[in-house]
Image: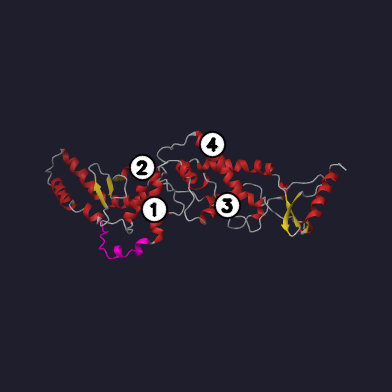
Amino acid sequence: MNNENITTNLIIKQMIQSNAMAHNAEYLATPIDNDFNLFNKTYANTGVVYASLKKAVESNNCESENCELESQALLQMQAAPQKSLDFMSDLQSNLMLTDEPAFDPNNNSDYTVANCVLNKRPGFSITDGYLVELNLLPEGSQEIIFLGPGFKQPLVINSTALSGILESGQSIVSETPDINKEMLRLLTEIGVFSADMVGEAGVLVAGAKISEEYVMINTDGSFDYEIIDVGNGKGRNVLKYDLNKIKRKVEPFINAEIAGMLSSEQSVIAAWNVYISQGTSVQEDDQMAQDANAGESSWSYEEDLPLQQDKKVLFESKYKEYFMNNYLKQFTTNQFPSVAEDAAVFDLAEGKQAKAQKFLDDNNLN
């Protein structure tokens, strides 16, 4: 685990969210140069070079045979501006992931700094010591170089390398899966809720209940209840569920979900670092001053990819725990009976005595 990435990413996030620079009188009084003038500098001398090459080709006064090299250079120069635009668009679409609420701070913090530089965030200007260069390379590719105090070392990204990564379905910044959305969808697919419990939006309706076939039944066919204390000597019945039966039903669906996730192992690492390792719910994270993250149990993108089998097995186990504890458990806990008379509040002592007597009667233990 790289503590430096976590520390830097969280400091930048805190600085941006706190609006500290907006209340810094000294900073507000300072002339800030944040115009990196990237394209103008890159293409400043290309016009002269292009004209020279074009003249050489048209007059057949070239150094290479049949003007082959000069013609190739002309084609590269003609394509370069659009390639620069595409390169920067691809790069920024990756870097903007560092702004996501569930961004994993174990990602390389250099990408967070680069995003701040390109978006001209306060504290990341030329005045603050940052520089950006876009270079046209002889073989036709391009490279961007970021320099400045927030980088661990000069950050160099090549257009061809980045394009290859994107075309393979990868990203230089790992996007954290929307765990809450995935879990809510999974609830509707695991087969323990009837179809009428799923709304038009594809999520469970308010007051949804697990199908009664998963409720524990007494020997006489009636529902088996657990008695809970509601205070002041009163009690209520709540349904008891066959948790083993539910687990057997749910497990194949969760296994299929995990298998799909493992097709993008960097997303698995992001989900592990932000949610799964600590087991905290999305709702708990929303109430924290700082998003929960794996800390010392983090997995590293540089060191743990590709994932070894032991980590895949651990992720599968913890993912199931996360789903069961944070999403399914609420539907098996303190659920009131559908039978009106069984749902009524009663004297706690009398209710416990009646339940004990029923157990003796049903099992011929009197």
Looking at the image, do the residues carrying marks 4 and 1 touch, with CB atoms under 8 Å apart?
A: no
* x and y, in percent, of residue 149 in the image: 29, 50
- Magenta stretch encompasses residue 26: yes
Left or right: 104 in relation to 334: left
Looking at the image, do the residues carrying marks 1 and 3 touch, with CB atoms under 8 Å apart?
A: no
Check disc 1: other Cα within 10 Å, few if <14, some if 14-19, many if 20+: few
Seen at 72% across and 57% down, the residue is 230
* x and y, in percent, of residue 225 in the image: 76, 50
Which is more foreground, mark 3 or mark 2?
3
Q: What amino acid does circle 2 point to?
A: Gly
The numbered dot on residue 164 is 2
| Sequence-earlier tag: 3 or 2 | 2
Q: Nearer the viewer, residue 7 or 286?
A: 7
Magenta stretch: give its range.
Answer: 20-36
Which is more foreground, mark 2 or mark 4?
4
At numbered mark 3, what does the secondary structure look like: helix, strand or loop?
Answer: helix
At numbered mark 4, what does the secondary structure look like: helix, strand or loop?
Answer: helix
The numbered dot on residue 184 is 3
- Magenta stretch encompasses residue 340: no
Between the residue at mark 1 and the residue at mark 3, the CA separation in whole angstroms equals 32 Å
- The residue lying furthest to the top in this view is 309
- The residue lying furthest to the front in this view is 232
Between the residue at mark 3 and the residue at mark 2, the CA separation in whole angstroms equals 34 Å
| Sequence-earlier tag: 4 or 1 | 1
Between the residue at mark 2 and the residue at mark 4, the CA separation in whole angstroms equals 30 Å
Q: What amino acid does circle 3 point to?
A: Leu
Judge whether residue 172 can be spotted in this image. no
Between the residue at mark 4 and the residue at mark 1, the CA separation in whole angstroms equals 33 Å
Q: What amino acid does circle 1 point to?
A: Ile
The numbered dot on residue 313 is 4
